[in-house]
Image: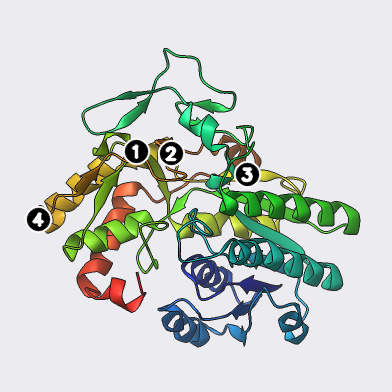
Amino acid sequence: MKVLITGICGFVGSSIARALFLRGSDVQVWGIDNFVRPGSETNRLDLGRLGAGFFHGDVRCASDFEQLPGVDWVIDAAANPSVLIGADGRTSSRQAVEHNLLGTINILEYCKAHKAGLVLLSSSRVYSIPQLQAIPLKESVDSFLFDHSKAAPPGVSALGLTEDFSSSAPVSLYGATKLASEALAQEYGYIYNLPVWINRCGVLAGAGQFGTAEQGIFSYWLHAHAQRRRIGFYGFGGRGLQVRDALHPNDLASIVIQQIGSSGLSKPGGIFHVAGGSNNAMSLAQLTAWCDERFGRHPAVSNSAIRPFDVPWVVMDSTKARQAFGWEPEITLPQILDEIAGHVKTHPDWLTVTGA
């Protein structure tokens, strides 16, 4: 089997590539990356030793695909993953669309030309911000909790959001480009008879992640806390009660490998949540308490102002993936945090190296 991974030297792309090499010698792995993100060169050297082939290119540039060999599957791990892209004062709206939608179009045209299947990695941020903000919650001492006693929007329970939760606008420019990418991938799959899988991923977390405050929050928080950088609780009373669930990239890789190797399990074309779920969920206040115990006390700044696209509780229900693939996350949140903490100890300059 020949596999092309876009964004192969990023955190997710490199993790999936390593997992494919562990799968066996019957896999040839190629990758395309623009190497813009500081720290990606480290992954290139490591994957090169494993046998990956590399092409320096940008998915936004159609001609960069002309140099690539034909493959059986493309795993799309190239994106600007920040929900604030186009609204953060550092990136433009055009950049948001070019990175996350034009890139998808070029990938789909490549798949069409080579009759290759596609695994599209999408996001939990495709869902309606007003509907996310309308989820009934109650407060504990250090976390928001789902409130069973009140009516909730369709597609959500204490287990988290299902794939049927509303994706009506506004969802952010980032979310809109991912939704559009999903729709195009499904259309290309239908029209040109290409196998397509779409995975809406939760918050990915693990050692070596190029974390920032806008994405990769678990990794960023541990590194920033240990280095005594400024960290802050923003919005919702400034207490850090907002909750996210964490997913290790090795768990994502395990379902991707099933999807590209066993089309008989489920008809390609499905959309699946691939996330840590309620068992791997934690608030920022709880994460800070964990860091205080591991690294020593370092209080977060409190600011009650709600920023664009802030939502209080996003937990993903992966029941559909379990039913289709027998998939569940195996790496627990404590294990993920311990792994990141080990990386913090051995890489005290990581945030500087990765430009966070």
Upstream in sequence: badge 3 or badge 4 = 3
Residue 127 figure quarter: top right
- At mark 2, the secondary structure is loop
254 sits to left or right of 195: left
- At mark 3, the secondary structure is strand
Residue at the image position 24 percent from the left and 62 percent from the top: 224
Q: Is residue 325 visible?
A: no
Residue receiving disc 4 = 296
Relative to 309, say whether 230 is above or below.
below
Cβ atoms under marks 1 and 2 closer than 8 Å: yes
Residue receiving disc 1 = 242
Q: Observer-nearest residue: 101 or 260?
A: 101
Q: Name which residue type carries label 4.
A: Gly
Q: Name which residue type carries label 3.
A: Phe
Mark 3 neighbour density, 10 Å: few (under 14) some (14–19) many (20 or more): many
Marks 1 and 4 sit apart, C-alpha to C-alpha, by: 22 Å
Q: Name which residue type carries label 1.
A: Gln
Residue receiving disc 3 = 272
Residue 65 figure quarter: bottom right
Of badges 1 and 4, the one in the foreground is 1
Residue at the image position 86 percent from the left and 51 percent from the top: 190
Mark 4 neighbour density, 10 Å: few (under 14) some (14–19) many (20 or more): few
Q: Is residue 309 visible?
A: yes
Upstream in sequence: badge 1 or badge 4 = 1
Marks 3 and 2 sit apart, C-alpha to C-alpha, by: 21 Å
Residue receiving disc 2 = 311
